[in-house]
Amino acid sequence: MIPNSVTLVEVGPRDGLQNEKQPVSTAHKVELVHRLQSAGLREIEVTSYVSPKWVPQMADNAQVMAAIARPVGVRHSVLVPNMVGLQAMLAGGAATRPDEIVVFGAATQAFSQKNINCSIEESIDRFAPVVAAALEAGLKVRSAISCALGCPYQGEVSPDEVEHLVKLMKGIGVQHCGIADTIGTGTPRRAQAVMERALRHYPMHEVSGHFHDTYGQALANIYACMELGVHTFDTSVAGLGGCPYAKGATGNVATEDVVFMLHGMGVATGIDLDALVDAGGFISDVLGRAPVSRAGKALLTKKGKVFAGAAA
Ligand code: HMG
Ligand code: MG
């Protein structure tokens, strides 16, 4: 039942960098995307068209989209929360056009209010015209179901609450269901239970897992979901990131760690681990710190890189 190959959706440039307080230049963001493309990532979440007052780091969304190369076979996506964002995205024409958009809702009312300033029901009302317009424009539409395994404000979240939002997203025409453990409190059996709810409404190839690694559970959760046959996961190079509206949340599971595990299991990813590790080293240098990725750090150390505080 374990899949022979897995697709990784690289979310570092968006989910990773959105949480950085220090400014990251547009040129560095573009170079990161290019390095990820060269490392073999075929799905990259590049930026988001959200309010720059809410997430200042993503304010250069159009400039990043206009500057990145578009190699054949690579799908680039952006987050869009409402029609203002969609119109801003479409205003750039072909030069800034992504292949896919992501609408992001939450399984709990509290997180929906904190993250996108509206209730779950209002978010669906806002997403519906965005989804319709994106489909009309020939874009694929993916969803992120935040707080599927725990909420920083509500606490426990039931699979029923998750399935409720999955059904609402499906009802407005969203084509792919991303189950997101925003605060990383999920554990393998619970991750499976929630995935099974998503799989009641979406086929296997349109379901994915997005696991933040705050409590060190992400690799185990990915493996548990692979046992169900799930073969698409979001990951973040160097373990960058977190969510500005989920205090203490760390980044997504590091792409390097997931690739190391999958290749060790003989599961194909199409990714060149060596080039990926260098991409993680590059963005970590830009940010002035070591990668969070354990595999990335170990492999960079093997190549001779010395990290501050490392034993001689
Ligand atoms: P709001 O203040 O309720 O929006 O924000 P509004 O419609 O009342 O408009 C207020 C002002 O914002 C207006 O400007 C709008 O034009 C402007 P003003 O008239 O005051 O000058 N505005 C916008 N500007 C740019 N782009 C837009 C946009 N919309 C309105 N799209 C809004 C609502 C959704 C915009 C806001 O709450 C927001 O931007 N939230 C972003 C939150 C965010 O990006 N969070 C992180 C991403 S989600 C995540 O990380 C989780 C995920 O990884 C999965 C997981 O791990 O769970 C995906
Ligand atoms: Mg996230």
Image: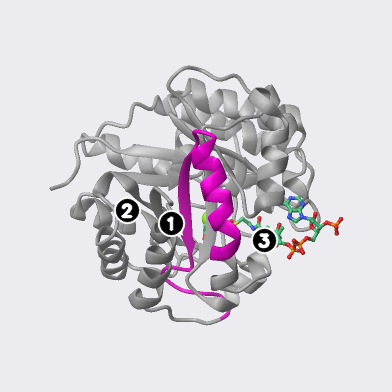
**Residue 99 image point, x, y percent:** 51, 32
Indicate whether residue 145 is drawn in magenta. Answer: yes
Question: Which of these two is toward me, 238 or 43?
Answer: 43
Q: At 47% from the left edge and 53% from the top edge, which residue is drawn?
A: 143
Evaluate if marks 1 and 3 touch, with contact meaning CB atoms under 8 Å apart. no
Secondary structure state at the residue bearing disc 1? strand
Relative placement, left or right, of 244 versus 75 is right
The amino acid pointed to by label 3 is Pro
Q: Which residue is mark 3?
A: 244
Evaluate if marks 1 and 2 touch, with contact meaning CB atoms under 8 Å apart. yes
- Identify the magenta region: 124-153
Q: Quarter-wise, where is residue 65 in the image?
A: top right
Question: Which of these two is toward me, 200 or 156?
Answer: 200
The dot on residue 211 is 1
Find the distance from the CA under tag 3 to the CA under tag 2: 24 Å
Q: Is residue 69 visible?
A: yes
Q: Which residue is mark 2?
A: 222
Label 3 CB, ligand 1: below 8 Å? yes
